Amino acid sequence: MKLTETDFNFASKIAASALLTATNKSGEINTMTVSWGGTGILWGREVAFVFVRPERYTFGFCEDGEDMSLSFFGKEKKDALTFCGTKSGRDVDKFEACNLKYTRQNGVCVFDDAQITVVLKKLYSQNLKEECFVNDSCKSFYQNGGYHKMYICEIKDVISL
């Protein structure tokens, strides 16, 4: 299914209820809460774009592999989303700690209780750079550095419960 074939409002959902899960070349996965991103059409494809700071453990998975998923949950998973946004996969197994059950579909993590999962294939990535900001107010997000890296990914599938 394509995202454009659904009535899913990506912009309203990503800020509150999304996990980005990346798979590295070894097949290992890690997940983190994300709240920045969007969707659109680019290069004749339906795409999603997300942003990850290099300090995050999931960043290495995004760099190493090509496959990712964005999973959106209801309010009942608010505590799990908060946990996955504040704890590192370096230190804790988030899947076990939050009772996040999943299956793999074509190598990509699909959570059993996600309302919708967007299956992604990485197409392009680029570091945000201080000198590229045209509006200085955006720099306030980077008082201590840690500029995000943007990943543009083709939407390969949309899985809805």
Image (tube, grey):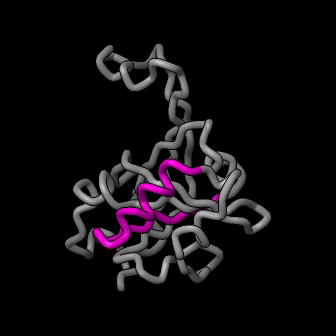
**Left or right relative to 15: residue 124:** right
Quarter of the image where one finds residue 18: bottom left
Q: Would residue 84 be counted in the magenta stretch?
A: yes
Badge count: 0
Q: Would residue 131 be counted in the magenta stretch?
A: no
Q: Residue at x 57, y 73 (%)?
A: 109
Looking at this rendering, what residue extends furthest in the right direction?
26
Residue 100: image x %, image y %?
Answer: 52, 75
Q: Residue at x 32, y 69 (%)?
A: 3
Question: Viewer-proximal residue, 77 or 141?
Answer: 77
Looking at this rendering, what residue extends furthest in the bottom direction?
161
Q: Residue at x 60, y 43 (%)?
A: 56
Reply above or below: 46 against 43. Answer: below
Question: Viewer-proximal residue, 43 or 91?
Answer: 91
Q: Quadrant of the N terminus?
A: bottom left
Q: Which residues are magenta?
A: 66-87
Q: Residue at x 33, y 16 (%)?
A: 134
**Left or right relative to 75: residue 121:** right
Q: Quadrant of the C terminus?
A: bottom left
The answer to whether one can see residue 114 in this image is: yes
The answer to whether one can see residue 45 in this image is: no
Reply above or below: 51 against 69. Answer: above
Residue 92: image x %, image y %?
Answer: 66, 58
Residue 16: image x %, image y %?
Answer: 30, 56
**Left or right relative to 88: residue 45:** left
Question: Viewer-proximal residue, 37 or 155?
Answer: 37
Residue 85: image x %, image y %?
Answer: 48, 51
